[in-house]
Structures are given as structure tokens and as C-alpha cells.
Amino acid sequence: MSTEDRSLNFIEQIIEDDLAKGFAQDKLRFRFPPEPNGYLHVGHASSICLNFGLGLKYNAPVNLRFDDTNPAKEEQEYVDAIKRDVEWLGYKWDKELYASDYFQELYDWAVVFIKKGVAYVDSQGSDEIARQKGTPTHPGTASPYRDRSVEENLELFEKMRAGEFPNGAHILRAKIDMASSNMLMRDPIMYRILHEKHHRTDNNWCIYPMYDWAHGESDYLEQVSHSLCTLEFLMHRELYDWFLDQIYDETKTRPKQREFARRNLSHTVVSKRKLLQLVQEKHVTGWDDPRMSTISGMRRRGYTPAAIRNFADTIGIAKRTNLVDVSVLEFCVREDLNKIAPRVMAVLDPVKLIITNYPEGQEEWLEAENNPEDESAGFREIPFSRELYIEREDFMENANSKYFRLTLGKEVRLKNAYIIKGESVVKDSEGNITEIHATYDTDSKSGSGSEASLRKIKGTIHWVSVPHAVKAEVRIYDRLFTHENPDGDKDVDFKSYINPNSLEVITGYLEPSLKSAVDGEHYQFQRLGYFCVDRDTNAEKIVFNKTVGLRDTWAKIESKE
């Protein structure tokens, strides 16, 4: 659904109202401001699509700004990963910026705050400060250092900046209102001492601004018009505006913070802290594990940028948080891959089929359509021989009348090939079928136009020629958590819901056209699902990840429970 085909969301309506009141469209500017303390996840994807989508809609610039104010948790690796993710989603930022670009301006403003009497150095410990905060129904109490003189505050703050104090010795607080009903307004912290090396500024600073102080002022310095945050920042808006009040110049654009609700995804977690825990405790192979809700994980699994953008548009922007079923995302992925993925044949649970009346040593190359959804995709040739692999579930020795795949005494069509009839089976000592013997109708070749080829056969199965088959490692992924909302029960560790069967590694057999497949390519394994070439592929081994099935099998499973 294009933006032209739907009504405005409430964020767009806010912008339209501002424009109607005289705000100049050429002053619109948006930003996506991640903290580089982890990899981006599906929730960030919605925010990326919102901000950059607004930029496209209004022909307005969008900044990519890294809120890098906590060097203890931030790394260049995360900066690089975030940039890759935004670019992969199809967006271009106007300016690449960092909160650390503004450390000097923020410091200078803090000095102005002290001189104005609206900031002071507090020398208490964190426990004392927390006790003095009060509760939502009881006001806080003032710090004994709240009325320090301007001169003393300036001297202490300068020494904090010079590195003369250890971590935790002092903080700089805004002097607002210890009785405010909004606890965030009860003299919030602006700066803390942190002797940590920063990924950009090295050891040049040992005091770092808090998020609430740095965020709005960064927006102001960049002249962002609309600062869009998730709903948990609603209570922060009053503080955002208070900080701006102290420095605002009426000749400049004043940023407006507005909030939208998170869209949580079922059967996963999107907390960076919990995602990091999954990585560090090796429940997954890394941030880009295809079971992860990270953008890099979804990319590796085979999700497409178009599918994620369409998902973000489908779920929309709302004012209330809700849980979106992961099947909605999978539907969007399936819908996009159906249009673009070439069709190929692969067998993942093989049993050998021998066509006894097909000449030994003979082979022929049959024509197959690459993608019926795309006429320009053309055709390819696939080899056919006397010995084939078929899926084990496509044969049943004793089948009822409603079974339309291969069985003894009945006919089935081999896709793009011939009609065959099951004749007999070979079993091992334990009774397992090791070979199926069949005969074929020599005149029934698909597309030949013969009368035999036009016979109506109810069942069609796929296959791979044994002598031409390409062996591959195939990773079958399932949902990482068995519970639809692993964060829902706060008394239960979310890791207790980890699905022990979220990954199965098997050996599959592929048609030879896939021998040259490269990392990131998408395919539909006919009748099985959509698959993507994994980056672990090399000259000795090709690796495929299952992206998504042809239909939502979880809906059937859950309906039975």
C-alpha cells in the first residue's frame, strides 16, 4: 500500500497542521538518532522507515545522528553496522552526525546554566540522590548542595572537566523543581564523570552529557524540526522543552518532540540488552544470526528491504503499543520474494527414485520457467536421468484415495518432466524404504504437446537428478522463542522460552544451476519455501538459509493447541 493510497497517520497530520499554520516546508528536517551500543532491530526499522519516509514524502533532509554519549557501551563496530543497515533498507541520509560533535557546545551551555543559577554540582552518592527523589505521589527533597554558589559550581565543574575527580565523585544537575509531579523534572543529571575512552573523541573528555541533556540540544543545533521518539519518551518531553527554553533563539527553528508507540514483534525480543545477552551467552551465533530480530539477522536470513519497508507501512504508526504477530512480517517477506525469487528444485529429505524403463546412462535437459510471476525471468535447463531424488514425504507405500503424490500403482507427474507410476520399493533390514522403482510414460514429456503429455494427473512432485545433484548444507530456522511474548511475564526469565528446535541443519540436494549461487541470492525451492545463500558459502560448500515457508505453518500448529 503506497502512502498515496492511505490516510495520513497522526505524525503526518501533525506536520500537515504545522505547515497549515505557516511553518515553511523548506525548514522541515528529520533525524534518525540511534545509540551505537548494539545492532539495530526490527523496531528500529520502523523508526527508520518513519523518519526517512517523511523525508521522501516532504522532500526534506534526514540526518543520521549517533547519540554516542556513553563510551562504556558504544563501539565503532555498532556505528558501522547501523550505517550498513540504513543503507541496505534503501535510505540515504543528508548528514552523518554525532552527539560527540557537540561536546564542546554542550559543555559551554552547561557553564551558562551554572551562571544563570539553573544548574549545580552535586557531590552526593547515587543512593542518596535516589532517596531524595521522592515518589510519584510524594515530592522530593533538595540536595544539601543545591544552593552552592555560582563560583563554587563553576570551579568544581571545571575540575570535573579537567579530570581531577574519580568516577561518581560529582555530577552536574539541572535546578528545576523537586516537587514536580513529573519525576524527571526533579533536578535531573546533566553530566557525570566517566573515565572511559570514547570511540571518536578518545580520552579528550572524562565528563559525558546525559541523554536527556544532549538529545534535544543536538536536535536544536542541527535545526531538526520534528524529533520523533517512541512512547517511553513521552514523560521526557517536558524536560526536552525545558532544556530548549534555556537556550532557544527565536530566529531559529525550535525542534518539536512527538511520540509514537512501539510495535513489538511476537516470538522475539527487541531489547538491545537482551539481544546482547543472547549473543554473549551463545544462544545464537552472533548479532546477525538469522533467528535474531536484528536488521542484520533478517538480512542474512533472506528478508528483503522492500519486505521490511512494506511491513513498516502495513503496521503503521499508532499512539498505543501493541504486539504484532510475526506472521505479518513473514507475509510481507513471502509476498516480495514471490515476485523476485527464481524457482528451482531442491530435495531436503531424499529418497532415491529409479525409473526402471528409462535407458541407463541416458540424460536429457528439460526446459523450466524461472519465475511465473516475472515473464522477463526467462527459462533454464535442468538435467533429467534414470535416478532421481524425491522428497520422502512425496511417497507413500499404502495410500488412500485422497493421497495425490507418488504411491504404488498410481501415476504422478514429475515437474517439468514425465508422468511416472510407482511399481515397487526396496527396503533395508529395518524396513525403511531405500529405493522406489517406477516406470515412466515415454510420450508424456511436459510441454511436448503430445496427447500423453496433456493427460490430467492430480499430483505433481519435484525432483533432482542424482548424478547432477549439488550437495548443500541447509539451515532450517524456526522462531527463536516458543512464547508469543517472551517479555510478557516479568517473573519468568525470557530465556526460558528459547525454542530448542529453532535451528536444524540438514544436507539437501539441489539442481546444478545452483552450483554458482552467491551470498545473498534468493530462491524459491519449489513446494518447500524461500531460501537464501548464506555468507558461510565457499568453494568447498554451499550453505542455504530457509527464509520463510510458502505458507504460515505456525497458524496451523497453534490452532491445534
Image (cartoon, rainbow, N blue to C red):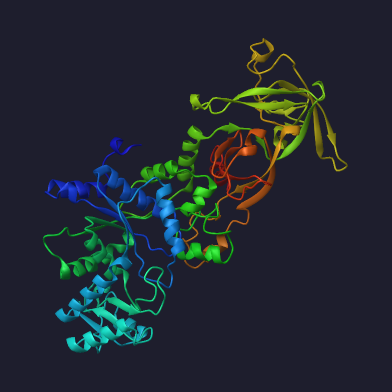
Total numbered labels placed on residues in the image: 0
**Residue 226 falls in which quadrant of the image?**
bottom left
Give the side of residue 414 with respect to residue 34, left or right: right
Q: Quadrant of the N terminus?
A: top left
Q: Residue at x 30, y 39 (%)?
A: 3
Spot occupied by residue 430 in the image (x, y as percentages of width and height): 85, 43
Give the side of residue 540 with respect to residue 304, left or right: right
Spot occupied by residue 377 in the image (x, y as percentages of width and height): 52, 27
Spot occupied by residue 347 in the image (x, y as percentages of width and height): 68, 37
Which one is in front, 195 or 233?
A: 195
Give the side of residue 333 with respect to residue 406, left or right: left
The reply to whether residue 266 is visible in this rendering is: no
Residue that protrudes farthest toward the right in the picture: 429
Q: Residue at x 63, y 36 (%)?
A: 514
**Residue 105 falls in which quadrant of the image?**
bottom left
Give the side of residue 247 with respect to residue 165, left or right: left
Q: Please, is residue 298 above or below residue 219 in the view?
A: above
Residue that protrudes farthest toward the top in the picture: 451
Spot occupied by residue 512 in the image (x, y as percentages of width and height): 67, 34
Which one is in front, 367 or 178?
A: 367
The reply to whether residue 293 is visible in this rendering is: yes
